[in-house]
Structure formats: structure tokens, C-alpha cells
């Protein structure tokens, strides 16, 4: 099937039946506008990221920006939060797959972050069928017949929030004036065209989560795109609301500034913990003094994570903005009551800590966790929709506290093998089209796989990358373990004999032992799908 495209736009992917309903001439025209207007700025910002990374590699340390002190010291607040976003005690997340969308909207959570990004392999079919699923979900016509069961929406559903791809990802199948469009703008513009007015008519609006930002200038770009798109669709300014995931160490130093840039369109910040840990490893990968212990030991109570969580909370509430806690990766364990009780205790503690600190809500990755998380927030909140009134004047986080990277030990053979195992398992599933994978009783997405990959790379290179038994982690050691862990993955992964897992082992080896560090796993992988 062929479709009409605006002048200067090319689409190189297959147009399957039904895709033409999403890729309409009018929707593509809306996509072309911000692509043309802002692609040079996106590229400048990505170049600025690379330049900043070079300076950090050379020993520079981040700090709060002197040039924006007036924003941090000002007494401004964000625009009022719409009623549909006032209560976000529990947010469930998951990919844009049809069954997941229905189950998540029905889960009893206050909101559902549907994900075109880290828990989704962004192949062409996933992105377009995801848009079809969004259109049907917004209109409440979404249903599914599968294995003799019918899935459809309940009367009461969660508020929908959409996460487009980050600034670093292209949509390789769509060119405007010979250049790839931004994956994020692609996801955003198509969703806006088909759903924004319908959502407003139904008493909510187009709400988004914005990932992977590294500076307030990147937030300004999103804000300018929001303004242009609202004008193009005839929507009042401020209709769009966006929550920013603070999931890079650099963004942690610019939280006030990010809220300020988006203040007409802001719905607060989220503590995106897994990507945040990955970002810390990535930004300080060449620092001989930097080293983090086994992934399992780096929790929200680690000094640098605690500082980040409290600063985010204080910053949001000072600006009348919601503060949303991150994801506990634990999921229910079906066939082992003892292990399940430990896992559920971990989720309870996580949500209780967030609620007691003052957070307005938190994330879960599984419908079976909604009630448990809700109970912990209701204990603190009662029948209040949020606790934005809970200010934290007692919190005063310094730059050195944000950079207090501990624990450094233990690093164990078990922890090293775990990283290799998870990396291969996740990459294998991702290449096969699934970006959200339960592994070892945790829900893994691209962020957790990034920790595993970057940790191995860094342990090889830092003098502190020494196992508990005194052995130095080396590339040779990692290479020897990879086939052993691949064999284990093949035994437990669904369809573990698929060639994608052997390919994943090759990629993991290359990325964890190569001299250069790949900025994101998903960039080279995306070229393979």
C-alpha cells in the first residue's frame, strides 16, 4: 500500500492495512512542521551533549549553573495542574502493546504511562500499532480477543500519559528534506493529531512523560514544540502537560530550570532511578575514583540516590509541582510464596519511603502491585489527592552530595555474571521485538540493561573494579563468562533458541569490552531492526 506524503517527506517502511489511518496526509503535515522547524536545534543539543561528555571525561565536575541562579532563587510556580492530573498516587507503566494497554488502564492505578520508549522495541510495527492502540484507547473502543478471552475497558480507567522517545533516537523510516525525523517528535505529533482534541472533549488532555533530558535547553525545545503544535491544532496554550523524568545526573543540577522552561506545560518531575544510575556510570566512566558496587547493592538509600530523591521532592513542591517516585523493578513471583513475600516487602518499603518523604505518587510495572503501592500512599495521604503542600525546608542538597557515589563495594563474581546474563537476555528479547522483559523476578527495560552493560565496561577499566576474592575484572574474564551466561539464558528465555540471543551475546561482548563507550545500547541496536 502507498500513501500520499507531504512535499519533502519520504517513508521507507511497509504500510500495512490500517496504518494509513494513522499516517494520514494531515497527520504527516503536522509531523513535518516541528521536524523542519526544530531539527537543527535538536542536532545542536545532541552536539552539546557530546561536548559536555568530553569535558566530563577530561575531569570536569557538574555543578548548579551560575547563570540561572535567579531562576533557582525566584519565587515562581508552574501553571495550575488540571484536575485529571491532581491525583497520581500510583502510576503503572508499560509498552504500547494492545493487551498491556487494556490491562494497565483497567489496573486501578490513577494513571498509566504508556511507553513508546524504554519498555518498547521501537521497530516500525510497534510504533504504528502503538498509535492505533492509543487512538482506540482514547475513544474507549479498544478491545482484544486472545486465547478465548475478551479484553475490554472497564467503566473507570486510569488517566493516560504518553512517553515518546528521547532526543537521541531517530525515526529512521521517515525523512523530511532528506533528514531522519526525531523519534520523539514522530511519536508526539501523531498522538497529538489523532487524540488531543478527543481527550479535551472527554475531560482530560494530552499528557506526556519526557525522557532522557540532560539540560533545561532540551526542555525549552519541547516547550517550543508544544506551543507550535497547540497553535497548529487550535488548542489553547497550556493544554499539553508534561512530566519530566529526571534520569540523568546532569538534569539533577537543573531541576528548577527544567520546571521553569515548561512552567505553562509542566506536570512536575519523576525520579527515574534506573536510567539515573546508568547516567552516573556513563558520565564518570573514565574517572579512576568512580566505581559502583554490584547493581543489586545500589538502592534508593545509597547516598547519591538519597540526595537526588530529596532534592527532586523539595524542588517540585516549592514550585507547586507534583513529585512522582520512580520504579521498583520487583514484580510478583508466582510459584514461590516465600520469595514473593520478600519481593512484595521490597515494594512496600520503597513506596512507604517515597510517601513518607513527601512524594505524591510512585510507579509500578505490574498490575499485581497497584493495590500494594496504593495502600502505602493512602496511609500517608488519606483522601487527599497529593501532598504538594508538604514543603521540605529541612532539605539542603549540595553538589558534592549529588556526586557522593557509594557503595563502591562489594563487586562479586555473582554480580558480574548477573550483569552479563541480564544484558544478553534483555538484548536478545529486544532484538526479537520485546522491550519489557521479566528476568530473575525483576521487570527489565532498556534502562536496567544499560546499567548492566555500562557497569561491566567500567569495572574492566577502573582500578577499583576488583572482585571480592581479589581478582581484577578484565575483558578476558568477561569474554570467558559470556558463552556460559548465554547458555543459561537460552535455557530460561522464551524462544531462547532464537538467533537474536546469540547476536545479543556478540553485541554485549563488543559493547562491554570495546575501547570506546557507546552512548546508548539502543542506538546501534536500532539500526539492526
Image (cartoon, helix red, strand yellow):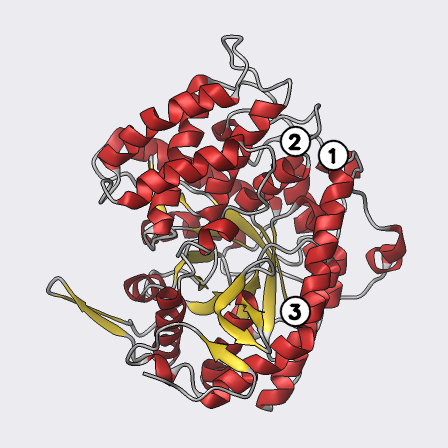
In the rendered image, residue 227, in percent from the top left (x then y), is placed at 67, 80
**Label 1: element kind:** helix
In the rendered image, residue 342, in percent from the top left (x then y), is placed at 36, 31
Q: Residues within 10 Å of mark 2 (few under 14, many from 20)?
A: some
Mark 2–mark 1 distance (CA, rounded to whole Å): 7 Å
Cβ–Cβ below 8 Å for labels 2 and 1?
yes
Which numbered disc, 2 or 3, marks the residue that appears first in the sequence? Answer: 3
Question: Could you say which is closer to the camera, residue 90 or residue 24?
Answer: 24
Whether residue 197 is visible: no
- The residue that mark 1 highlights is 401
In the rendered image, residue 402, in percent from the top left (x then y), is placed at 72, 38
Tell me if residue 301 comes above or below residue 30 in the rendering. above
- The residue that mark 2 highlights is 303
The residue drawn where x is 61% and y is 76% is 35
Mark 3–mark 1 distance (CA, rounded to whole Å): 29 Å
Question: Could you say which is closer to the camera, residue 122 or residue 87?
Answer: 122
Image side of residue 127 versus residue 325, left or right: left
Amino acid at each position: 500500500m502507498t500513501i500520499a506524503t507531504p512535499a519533502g517527506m519520504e517513508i521507507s517502511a511497509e504500510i500495512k492495512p490500517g496504518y494509513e489511518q494513522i499516517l494520514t496526509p494531515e497527520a504527516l503535515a503536522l509531523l513535518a512542521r516541528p521536524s523542519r522547524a526544530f531539527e537543527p536545534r535538536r542536532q545542536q543539543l545532541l552536539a552539546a551533549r557530546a561536548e559536555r561528555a568530553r569535558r566530563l571525561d577530561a575531569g570536569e565536575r557538574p555543578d548548579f549553573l551560575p547563570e540561572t541562579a535567579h531562576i533557582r532563587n525566584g519565587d515562581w510556580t508552574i501553571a495550575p495542574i488540571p484536575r485529571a492530573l491532581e491525583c497520581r498516587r500510583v502510576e503503572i507503566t508499560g509498552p504500547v502493546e494492545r493487551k498491556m494497554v487494556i490491562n494497565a488502564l483497567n489496573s486501578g492505578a490513577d494513571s498509566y504511562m504508556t511507553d513508546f520508549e524504554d519498555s518498547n522495541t521501537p521497530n516500525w510495527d510497534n510504533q504504528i500499532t502503538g498509535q492505533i492502540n492509543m487512538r482506540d484507547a482514547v475513544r474507549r473502543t479498544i478491545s482484544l480477543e486472545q486465547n478465548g478471552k475478551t479484553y475490554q475497558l472497564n467503566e473507570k480507567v486510569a488517566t493516560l500519559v504518553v512517553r515518546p522517545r528521547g532526543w537521541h533516537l531517530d525515526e529512521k523510516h521517515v525523512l523530511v528534506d532528506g533528514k531522519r525525523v526525531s523519534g520523539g517528535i514522530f511519536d508526539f505529533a501523531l498522538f497529538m493529531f489523532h487524540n488531543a482534541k478527543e481527550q479535551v472533549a472527554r475531560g482530560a488532555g494530552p499528557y506526556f512523560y519526557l525522557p532522557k533530558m540532560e539540560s533545561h535547553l532540551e526542555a525549552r525545545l519541547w516547550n517550543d514544540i508544544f506551543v507550535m503544535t497547540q497553535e497548529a491544532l487550535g488548542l489553547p496554550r497550556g493544554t499539553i502537560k508534561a512530566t519530566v523524568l529526571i534520569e540523568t545526573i546532569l538534569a539533577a543540577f537543573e531541576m528548577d530550570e527544567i520546571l521553569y522552561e515548561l512552567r505553562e506545560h509542566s506536570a512536575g518531575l519523576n525520579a527515574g532511578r534506573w536510567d539515573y544510575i546508568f547516567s552516573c556510570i556513563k558520565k564518570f566512566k573514565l574517572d579512576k575514583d568512580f566505581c559502583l558496587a554490584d547493581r543489586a547493592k545500589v538502592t534508593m538509600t545509597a547516598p547519591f540516590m538519597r540526595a537526588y530523591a530529596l532534592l527532586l521532592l523539595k524542588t517540585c513542591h516549592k514550585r507547586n509541582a507534583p513529585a512522582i517516585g520512580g520504579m521498583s523493578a520487583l514484580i510478583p513471583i508466582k510459584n514461590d510464596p516465600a520469595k514473593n513475600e520478600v519481593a512484595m516487602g521490597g515494594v512496600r518499603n520503597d513506596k512507604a519511603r517515597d510517601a513518607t518523604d513527601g512524594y505524591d505518587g510512585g510507579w509500578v510495572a505490574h498490575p499485581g502491585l497497584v493495590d500494594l503501592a496504593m495502600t502505602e500512599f493512602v496511609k500517608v495521604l488519606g483522601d487527599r489527592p497529593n501532598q504538594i503542600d508538604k514543603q521540605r525546608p529541612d532539605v539542603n542538597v549540595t553538589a558534592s552530595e549529588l556526586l557522593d557515589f557509594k557503595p563502591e563495594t562489594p563487586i562479586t563474581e555473582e554480580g558480574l555474571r548477573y550483569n552479563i546474563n541480564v544484558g544478553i537476555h534483555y538484548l536478545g528479547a529486544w532484538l526479537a521485538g520485546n522491550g519489557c522483559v521479566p528476568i530473575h523476578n525483576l521487570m527489565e527495560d532498556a534502562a536496567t540493561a544499560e546499567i548492566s552493560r555500562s557497569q561491566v565496561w567500567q569495572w574492566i577499566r577502573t582500578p577499583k573494579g576488583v572482585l571480592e576474592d581479589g581478582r581484577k575484572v578484565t575483558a578476558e574474564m568477561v569474554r570467558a563468562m559470556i558463552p556460559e551466561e548465554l547458555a543459561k539464558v537460552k535455557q530460561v528465555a522464551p524462544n531462547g533458541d532464537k538467533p537474536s540471543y546469540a547476536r545479543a551475546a556478540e553485541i554485549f561482548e563488543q559493547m562491554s569490552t570495546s575501547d570506546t563507550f557507546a552512548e546508548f545500547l539502543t542506538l546501534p541496536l536500532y539500526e539492526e531492526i
